[in-house]
Amino acid sequence: MRATRFTLEAVDWEAWMPPVDPATATPDQRAALDASPQATSAYFRTLAHDVASLAERSPLFHAVMYAPRGLKRADRELAAVVVSIINGCVYCSSVHARRFVELSKQPEIIRALYDQGVDTPLPPRPRAIVDFAAKLTRVPVEMTVADLRPLREVGLDDLEIHDLTNAVAMFANANRLMQTLGEPVEAA
């Protein structure tokens, strides 16, 4: 059954085209899958149809989301959740909401975003991150230097702002892939 609501529970994903079968994958597909963190998932096996793109996507994703410097990982996950909520990507939101809660120990932030929307009251740092991610997702052409001020006021430096921007941009792409190549389904 299609998953249609945002949740902190696990959600599965079902491909709309046959994912690449690891047993019959080409050497290039196998190498790209081997470099991907969840090579056995239907999503990554579906991405393997475009092996060149997958081979670039996995290292880029890791550089953006798991870099040991710059923006805190929880803040990157929060940005991914916001982008996914706005874009309606139930699967990505579920995965990254759980990671945010695991890292931050703040499930109340996710519950507020899910229950009241991205404009819900939040503490200053998450509020600045949510506002930036929401505006960049909704109306990137309207971004100005003034949009950096709230981030700087809560202590983000240039590298952290760059990392936040990369996370938001990464999930604009990730959401479109998830939503076009398959659908979220309730976990079995």
Image (cartoon, grey):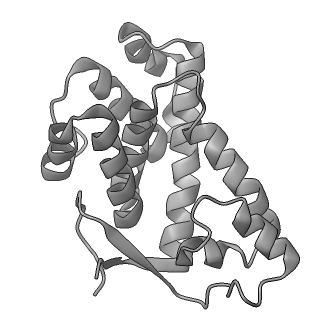
At horizontal 19% and vertical 42% (from top left) the residue drawn is: 107
Q: Is residue 23 left or right of residue 45?
A: right
Q: Quadrant of residue 36?
A: bottom right
Between 160 and 95, the one nearer to me in the picture = 95
At horizontal 76% and vertical 65% (from top left) the residue drawn is: 32
Residue 59 placed where, x, y %? 71, 48
Residue 106 placed where, x, y %? 21, 35
In the rendered view, tell whether residue 125 sits above or below residue 35.
above
Between 138 and 188, the one nearer to me in the picture = 188
Residue 57 placed where, x, y %? 70, 55
Q: Is residue 12 left or right of residue 180?
A: left
At horizontal 51% and vertical 69% (from top left) the residue drawn is: 178
In the rendered view, tell whether residue 74 sits above or below residue 24.
above
At horizontal 49% and vertical 80% (from top left) the residue drawn is: 182
Residue 62 placed where, x, y %? 63, 44
Q: Is residue 8 left or right of residue 15?
A: left
Between 37 and 5, the one nearer to me in the picture = 37
Q: Quadrant of the C terminus?
A: bottom left
Q: Count the marks.
A: 0
Q: Quadrant of the N terminus?
A: bottom left
Residue that sits furthest to the right in the current view: 27
